[in-house]
Image: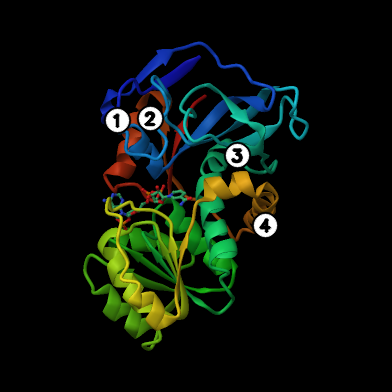
Amino acid sequence: MKAVLCKAFGPAENLVLEEVASPEAKKNEILLDVHAAGVNFPDTLIIEGKYQFKPPFPFSPGGEAAGVVAAVGEKISHLKVGDRVMALTGWGSFAEQIAVPGYNVLPIPSAMDFTTAAAFSMTYGTSMHALKQRAQLQPGETLLVLGASGGVGLAAVEIGKAMGARVIAAASSAEKLAVAKNAGADELINYSESNLKEELKRLTQGNGVDVIYDPVGGDLFDHAIRSIAWNGRLLVVGFASGRIPELPVNLALLKGAAVLGVFWGSFAQRQPQDNAANFQQLFAWHAEGKLKPLVSQVYPLEKAGEAIDSLANRKAVGKVVVAVR
Ligand SMILES: NC(=O)c1ccc[n+]([C@@H]2O[C@H](COP(=O)([O-])OP(=O)(O)OC[C@H]3O[C@@H](n4cnc5c(N)ncnc54)[C@H](OP(=O)(O)O)[C@@H]3O)[C@@H](O)[C@H]2O)c1
């Protein structure tokens, strides 16, 4: 089979496309014929050796995939050969086949194509878990989404609207904000041009925002936490800016606020039934047209490195997908 390989930590231009042996499914795994693979920010980190997981070389990047079950291990009962599925893989999806533990694989609705399915699980799974189990977002509350046109950010905008919140989308350019508006955002803030704290004060009549969804970290975190409402919740989702911020905890005390970590991969593994229920809701909203996953660009397998670079260079909007077959 063909696979994109990372043979040493380094930039995406060092990735190579090679012919390698197909994997085999162990007892608790399925073998997946990969049709499409979603690109996510962790792909930019894993090839550089900056991610929390460091797979042995050579490995294929690619944290999520959609395709068809080609074989099942003897302990797998919820899936069969020929099922159309999406899978959370961590790495390995930029290849024609991958063996995946069964608990990380979900059947996809018959109306959902592979490109959409490959762009769905990581971003919507993360944002649903963040807003539902962690923040317990309520209808009528105000939700601020930072990096609102990115993968997880745009999913948070749509899910926030589906949950009945007033969504303030914040991003670095007018083009990116137009994408967030199209996804349903009620208010827009361009944080390259305006003062985030002042804008939030204006948009909330000085009350602050109830829930902050932060996949960016760095300076944006520092400004946003000062604009949180009484009883507010700040969701720590990621650090796309490259800086893990530090919190003066008196700010949490003064607002009776909570800072909540979000780690969807662990949640999916530790609470599979809750995760499956989340996806039933997400699939229902998708069928009702409330979620419209935006795949802005599809790259062929041999250009997977360029796809990763589009996220690293802050160029991507919505989701970028690699067409594997
Ligand atoms: N906790 C979890 O379970 C979980 C799951 C998935 C992803 N994540 C994390 O969430 C973050 C976003 O992932 P994603 O896949 O949604 O990425 P993405 O599509 O690339 O979006 C990231 C956004 O961050 C903003 N950003 C600010 N500074 C940036 C920089 N220096 N480089 C790149 N982007 C920058 C960009 O928006 P502007 O240009 O508008 O600022 C961009 O749209 C990552 O840190 C990722 O590791 C966490």
**Residue occupied by mark 2:** 304
Label 3: which secondary element:
loop
Q: What crowding class fits label 2: few (fewer than 14 Cα within 10 Å), some (14-19), or many (20 or more)?
A: many
**Residue occupied by mark 1:** 12
How far across and down, in percent of the image, does residue 118 sit?
53, 39
235 lies above or below 19 = below
How far across and down, in percent of the image, does residue 81 sit?
73, 24
178 lies above or below 195 = above
**Residue occupied by mark 3:** 113
**Residue occupied by mark 4:** 281
| Residue 77 horizontal side relative to residue 67, left or right | right
Label 1: which secondary element:
helix
Mark 1 touches mark 2? (CB < 8 Å): yes
Q: Quadrant of residue 4?
A: top left
Number of on-image labels:
4
Q: At x 34% / y 31%, what residue is drawn?
A: 47
